[in-house]
Image (tube, rainbow, N blue to C red):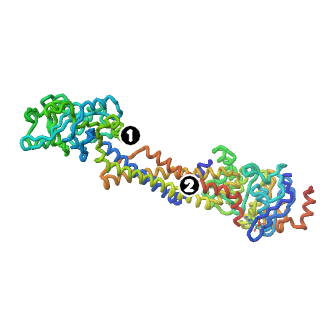
Amino acid sequence: MNLFKLVLIELWHRKSQLVSGLLAITLGIGVIVGIRSFSVVSEKAVAVNLDNLGANIMVLPQAASVDNYYSADIDAPTFPESYVERIVTSSLPGVDNLSPKLTRRLKIGNESIVLTGILPKSEIASKPIWQQGGLFADKIAASCAPKPGAEPAKYLDERLQRKGIDSLAEADCFIGSVIAQRLNLKEKDKLNIEGKDFTVVNVLPETGTVDDDRVFANLHTVQELLGTGEQISAIEIMGCCSEISDGLLGKLRNVLPDTRITTIGQIVSTQIETNKMMNKISFVFLIIILFVGGISIGNYIWANVNERRKEIGILRMIGYHKRHVYFILVLKGIIIGFLGGIAGYILGTFGAIWLGPQFAGIEVAPIYTLILVSVVISVSVSIIGTVIPAYMAGKIEPFSNMQEE
Amino acid sequence: MLIKTRNLTKIYPHNDGAVHAINNLSFDIPKGSFVTVTGASGSGKTTLLLILGGLLHPSSGTMVYNGKALNMQKDDVMANFRSNHVGFVMQSFALISYLTAVENIMIALNVRNKNKAEARKQAIELLDWVGLNDRINHYPKELSAGQQQRVAIARALANSPDLLLADEPTGNLDPGLSEEILGILKVINENHNTTVIMVTHSPIAASFGNITISLENGQIKTNNQSKYEEIFQLTH
Ligand SMILES: Nc1ncnc2c1ncn2[C@@H]1O[C@H](COP(=O)(O)OP(=O)(O)O)[C@@H](O)[C@H]1O
Ligand SMILES: [Mg+2]
């Protein structure tokens, strides 16, 4: 019989004590795993939001107002179109798509519209939402910006996408859903703006943003129509979310110092705040676990040592060394830590899966890598908790059991 | 001589004044003898046994085992001494409650790095030898006092000790069982040439030995000391 088996027999023999010793660490790990499972899903949701919302960085002239991300380009002053070139040649990582825009508020009869000149390919590609049929209409993997190779799979209707890009010719336009309704327009209808006739090639799905009031036409047509020359009022950039948090904005500001650069951040900032808070909470719990879990396991081992004075004395009497006694106790700590980590993982994961939809409306999926994290934390805490009792146990005299009568 | 002690003294510190548990003991024990240690309660019998078994360091004096001085040795050296040379039998049996009879013996073999199957086989042989081959998988609480003490004896024999130390091994047993246990100890002493040192209250038990050490207040009874010097030709 080896020491490992001796420990297992002993733990099994005192099951109820083992369970109470496990309680704190299991609960603690459970809470950490639960929070973590939530926040990972929530972080994914943020990433999906950013991707779904299309361009998520906006380059505006210095004087523009940025109260509303979606309408920031409207009536803004202009800057040269060559700024697009500057960003491209700077080859910053995380910039996936550039979409220069020129926007003016105009009237068609009594209806006010927002005429937006775009360069079709880049504008379409940076707005996956248009092909999705609306916000959150379909689940998008929480990836970075759509990658060129994987792109087609994401669109529900590929033909729609091709058509849009290919056919936004000099006299073509896309119209938002609100415009279509108000002006009673459908595909192939004619639309006269400032004396120029446009053909409606596509009515865009509703987005719930100012985009629904927009008429999109070719940038160069719009520049001509408004007489601005090679000027634009905004550049929308599809930025990779992780790059944005890595300081992409600052880098862009270096490239275009006389512009104003903003992100869609405000929209997702609450969610990011929540995630930050969740992470803070799990950190606090980690600290609490270190104390409570460690102390409770230490207490278990300590009680165990006291109860086992006689047994330890017997083992020492028949020739076991101090190091064997340490080994037995640390092994016990490791086993308890391991069990606590596994039990905590299961508790936290099932808790999150069960509570997620009920309280937060989030579907939580198990995160398997957390098993390892749980076990490592739990075992480390457990070993720390075991050190002092093990040291005390080493001091138990080999004959202490013999002095009892 | 298996054991030589010279001026062996153990002082337990205590708030009410230090206790001289044993005081200046000098004696020799030849290999193969059956020594009984008698004396009133508190006379230092257990303390003496603990020192002889390498469980306790004397405060002063020397204890030489097979020519090797054992006092003031490191903890690990003492642990090795116990596992290689000494078997212990205690009044309270000192069995581990959650281990079966065979497992209680296997843990003693385990210190000596026996492989599992071999250890189990040997443990069963030992149980067989003390007449418990039908109680192999019984827990201590499922055994009678006499059976428990036989398991303890089997465990004490697991390392084939040169020295068997027994502290009132029959103290918790009724007379019939006592004699049985004493008989087993006697056989061990005679058949295996194992030196047995047994602490006992009972005159009957004392009569099983061929040498008796009578203690009084931690010292060999004065009317006994000359007799000892005669028997052992104690060399100072
Ligand atoms: N651990 C100890 N601390 C203090 N005094 C002790 C300790 N163990 C024994 N004693 C004292 O030493 C003396 C001898 O004890 P012991 O060897 O157990 O005697 P016996 O076994 O003959 O009854 C007693 O007076 C006892 O009170
Ligand atoms: Mg005693």
How many C-alpha atoms fall within 10 Å of the one at disc 2: few (<14), some, or many (≥20)?
Answer: many
Q: Which mark is residue A385?
A: 2
Side of A8 relative to A216 (left or right) = right
Side of A178 relative to A268 (left or right) = left
Compared to A96, does A285 lie above or below? Answer: below
Looking at mark 1, is its residue's CB closer than 8 Å to ligand 1?
no
Can residue B134 be seen from the camera position used here? Answer: no
Looking at mark 2, is its residue's CB closer than 8 Å to ligand 1?
no
Q: Secondary structure at mark 2?
A: helix
Q: Which amino acid is tagged 2?
A: Gly
Q: Residue drawn 56% across and 60% down?
A: A299
Instruction: Point out residue B189 in the picture as x, y percentages from the top left corner.
Output: 80, 54
How many C-alpha atoms fall within 10 Å of the one at disc 1: few (<14), some, or many (≥20)?
Answer: few
Residue closest to the eye, A295 or A53: A53
- Per the model, the C-alpha gap separating discs 1 and 2 is 39 Å
Q: Which amino acid is tagged 1?
A: Asp
User: Residue A249 is drawn in which quadrant?
Assistant: top left
Side of B65 relative to A372 (left or right) = right
Circle nearer the N terminus (1, 2): 1
Determine the chain carrying the residue at label 2. A
Q: Secondary structure at mark 1?
A: helix
User: What residue does disc 1 label?
Assistant: A246
Instruction: Point out residue A125 in the picture as x, y percentages from the top left corner.
Output: 24, 33
Q: Residue drawn 53% across and 60% down?
A: A17
